[in-house]
Image: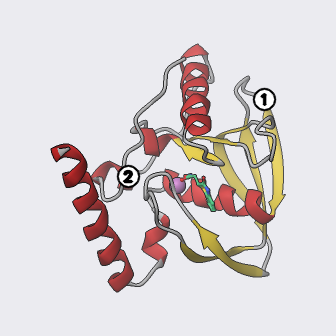
Amino acid sequence: MSKLTILRYPHPNLHQVAKPVEVVDDRVRQIVADMFETMYDANGVGLAATQVDIHERIIVMDVSEERDQPIVLINPVVVWSSSEHVVNEEGCLSVPGIYDAVDRAERVRVKAMDEHGNSREVEGEGLLSRCIQHEMDHLQGKVFVEYLSALKRNRIKTKLVKAERDAAKA
Ligand code: GNR
Ligand code: NI
């Protein structure tokens, strides 16, 4: 296993659209294992392949308190989402230190494959629902700050570019 580097906003590759996985083989299982290592190490509840510069439709998640309930979604498709929406705080490992409110469907149901190529459906509410929608956005090249006003987004961009510059100097 190896830890992967998480791209930070405004890295242009965060806006690439991921391609479907054609075969779930050992290559894909290695990506999944590396993504879990990266996600757990960063204390995230989810990670999309896009964030580690792999542009394939792969998501890993674990919203459990004990960090012992890994979920793998390969080629996920939303099959149902509730008409009720909720606004809640959201963060992103690619946008470190920034949290803001985002409107999402309260519940979603997705169909996807697991790391063995078996088809499955996952229905979520609360953080799991929010996380599924956040990760599906990443696969479409969308970062949560794109839901915020241009003013906020530009402030975030400036702040992160500056932080990156300071880190490079240090
Ligand atoms: O770790 C994460 N927490 C989180 C909190 C609220 C809504 C979404 C998320 S996902 C985020 C990890 C991440 O950036 N996944 O892409
Ligand atoms: Ni994210």
- Residue 13 horizontal/vertical position (percent): 32, 48
What amino acid is found at the position of numbered circle 1 in the picture?
Answer: Asn
Q: Secondary structure at mark 2?
A: helix
**Nearer the observer, disc 1 or disc 2?**
2
Q: What crowding class fits label 1: few (fewer than 14 Cα within 10 Å), some (14-19), or many (20 or more)?
A: few
* Quarter-of-image position of residue 120: top right
Instruction: Quote the CA–CA distance across marks 1 and 2.
Output: 28 Å
Residue occupying image coordinates x 35% and y 71%: 156
Residue behind mark 1 = 118
Of callouts 1 and 2, the N-terminal one: 2
Q: Quadrant of ligand 1?
A: bottom right
Asked whether residue 14 appears in the rendered view, the answer is yes
Residue occupying image coordinates x 19% and y 53%: 165
What amino acid is found at the position of numbered circle 2 in the picture?
Answer: Leu
Looking at the image, which is closer to me, 83 or 14?
Answer: 14
Residue behind mark 2 = 14
Residue occupying image coordinates x 37% and y 56%: 15
User: In the figure, is residue 168 to the left or right of 147?
Assistant: left
The answer to whether residue 58 is above or below residue 165 is: above
Task: Tell me how many marks there are.
Answer: 2
